[in-house]
């Protein structure tokens, strides 16, 4: 019989230790254990009005220090229906990954939990995207109530900042989707922003895993719809019969289900971008779903984006002075094919956009057109027609390159690739 040498034993011990360390590191600290009683008591004392960062429908957030790190206590409201399911969703998610994995992929990491108190302790990042954007608007216009019809423009000093944050969110979604996870609640409130001294820019982190779903087979059917209604994709606005959709004899004919896939995250990201530059969601008015079947109705958009689409529509149909009403609609396939050619025409024609319609100039017109194109493709009616995330990364980086180019060049060259 051949015995293990000291070298073999050392290697086996090292591998076992490494595996144990990784597994342990991935686990959240259980604050309900007796040895953590004083820590939990201290955290409970931090749940005061003075430490309140914000609150939503299911939980409140309190700032604290945990293990010498700036942290946030998420206190779940245990009187809400299904709240234990949402709390457990977070625990299941956080026990799958290490802190390094999450932070490297722009996802907010967590440190500890208490099932008894329904507490989750996560890393403190900073303001959410809405607060960040409103702060930017405050710097530009002063601290006052905003009328977006009056003050709306493309804030070109912040355009690249927001594109970087969009790219961070895409990176987070790529990581989730690669691990067969659907976030199910992508929206500005759930993107936290901080300034990174090393990267010398603002960085976005995706948070809130109350509604995550796992899709080993690519898509799943559920009886319950979760997420935020204003960001629902088309497939979440209708119910489907399980038997018909699956093509087999499973399920009851009277049962109705909602279809979930990774493409609902892509759709919500499109609406996130739309909200950032083209809509009034930030005024807390309910944003109507702009996609109705395969068309986009112009009267659902603000006047600046309406003006762009109107010019495209007029150009495409060789007509002028078209009245915008609920009967005018732009077909997404036409817009997608023609937008780049039209951008060049608008850029060269200085009269295409006067100061009344777009108070910004040529760079903003091009930026608006390109972002509108992204929104169009991300929010397609059919899930499989929406932009894949890798293509979205390419398109967002092209916009950044275009902005940099236009900073140093007053005109577009004929052969410049948009």
Image (tube, rainbow, N blue to C red):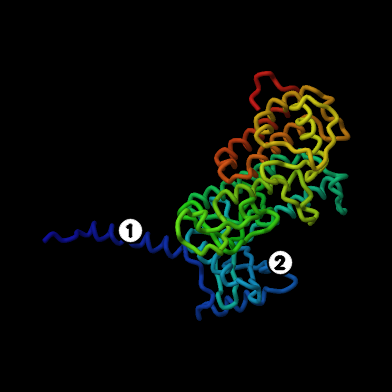
Q: In this view of the protein, which residue sits in the foreground, 258 or 303?
A: 258
Residue that carries the numbered disc 1 in the rendered image = 15
Q: Residues within 10 Å of mark 1 (few under 14, many from 20)?
A: few
- Residue found at x 73% / y 31%: 366
Which quarter of the figure is the N terminus placed in? bottom left
Residue that carries the numbered disc 2 in the rendered image = 55
Q: Position of residue 381 (x, y in %)?
A: 63, 45
Q: Marks 1 and 2, Cα distance to the nearest angstrom?
A: 44 Å
- Residue found at x 66% / y 34%: 399
Q: Position of residue 132 (x, y in %)?
A: 73, 52
For residue 310, above or below residue 244: above
For residue 89, above or below residue 107: below
SS class of the residue under badge 2?
Answer: strand
For residue 329, above or below residue 252: above
Q: Position of residue 276 (x, y in %)?
A: 73, 46
- Of marks 1 and 2, which one's residue comes earlier in the chain? 1
Q: Position of residue 357 (x, y in %)?
A: 85, 35
- Residue found at x 80% / y 54%: 283
- Residue found at x 57% / y 69%: 87
For residue 398, above or below residue 71: above
- Image quadrant of residue 21? bottom left
- Image quadrant of residue 397? top right
> Can residue 392 be seen by looking at this rendering?
yes
Q: In this view of the protein, which residue sits in the foreground, 104 or 367?
A: 367
SS class of the residue under badge 1?
Answer: helix
Q: In this view of the protein, which residue sits in the foreground, 402 or 99?
A: 402
Residue farthest to the front, as pictured: 253
Question: In the image, which disc is placed on residue 62?
Answer: none
């Amino acid at each position: 019989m051949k015995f293990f040498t000291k070298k073999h034993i050392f290697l086996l011990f090292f591998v076992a230790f490494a595996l144990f360390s990784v597994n342990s590191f991935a686990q959240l600290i259980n604050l309900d254990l007796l040895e953590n009683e004083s820590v939990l008591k201290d955290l409970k004392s931090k749940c005061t009005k003075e430490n309140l960062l914000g609150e939503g429908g299911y939980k409140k957030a309190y700032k604290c220090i945990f293990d010498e790190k700036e942290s946030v206590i998420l206190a779940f409201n245990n009187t809400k229906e299904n709240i234990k399911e949402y709390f457990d969703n977070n625990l299941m998610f956080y026990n799958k990954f290490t802190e390094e994995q999450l932070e490297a992929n722009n996802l907010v990491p967590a440190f500890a939990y208490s099932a008894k108190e329904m507490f989750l302790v996560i890393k403190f990042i900073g303001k959410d995207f809405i607060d960040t954007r409103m702060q930017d608007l405050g710097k530009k216009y002063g601290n006052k109530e905003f009328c977006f019809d009056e003050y709306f423009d493309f804030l070109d000093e912040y355009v690249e900042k927001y594109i970087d944050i969009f790219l961070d969110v895409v990176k987070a979604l790529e990581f989730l989707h690669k691990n067969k996870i659907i976030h199910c609640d992508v929206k500005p409130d759930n993107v936290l922003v901080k300034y990174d001294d090393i990267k010398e820019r603002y960085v976005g982190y995706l948070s809130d895993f109350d509604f995550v779903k796992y899709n080993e087979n690519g898509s799943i059917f559920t009886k319950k719809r979760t997420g935020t209604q204003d960001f629902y994709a088309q497939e979440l606005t209708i119910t489907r019969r399980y038997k018909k959709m699956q093509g087999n004899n499973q399920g009851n004919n009277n049962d109705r289900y909602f279809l979930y896939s990774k493409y609902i995250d892509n759709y919500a990201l499109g609406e996130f971008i739309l909200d950032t530059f083209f809509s009034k969601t930030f005024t807390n008015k309910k944003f109507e779903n702009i996609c109705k079947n395969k068309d986009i109705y112009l009267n659902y958009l603000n006047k600046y984006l309406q003006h762009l689409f109107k010019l495209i529509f007029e150009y495409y149909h060789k007509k002028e002075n078209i009245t915008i009403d609920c009967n005018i609609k732009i077909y997404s396939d036409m817009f997608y094919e023609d937008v780049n050619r039209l951008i060049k025409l608008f850029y060269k024609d200085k009269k295409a956009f006067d100061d009344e319609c777009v108070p910004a100039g040529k760079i903003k017109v091009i930026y608006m057109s390109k972002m509108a194109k992204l929104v169009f493709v991300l929010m397609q009616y059919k899930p499989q027609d929406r932009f894949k995330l890798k293509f979205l990364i390419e398109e967002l980086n092209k916009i950044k390159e275009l902005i940099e180019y236009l900073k140093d060049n007053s005109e577009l060259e004929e052969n410049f690739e948009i």
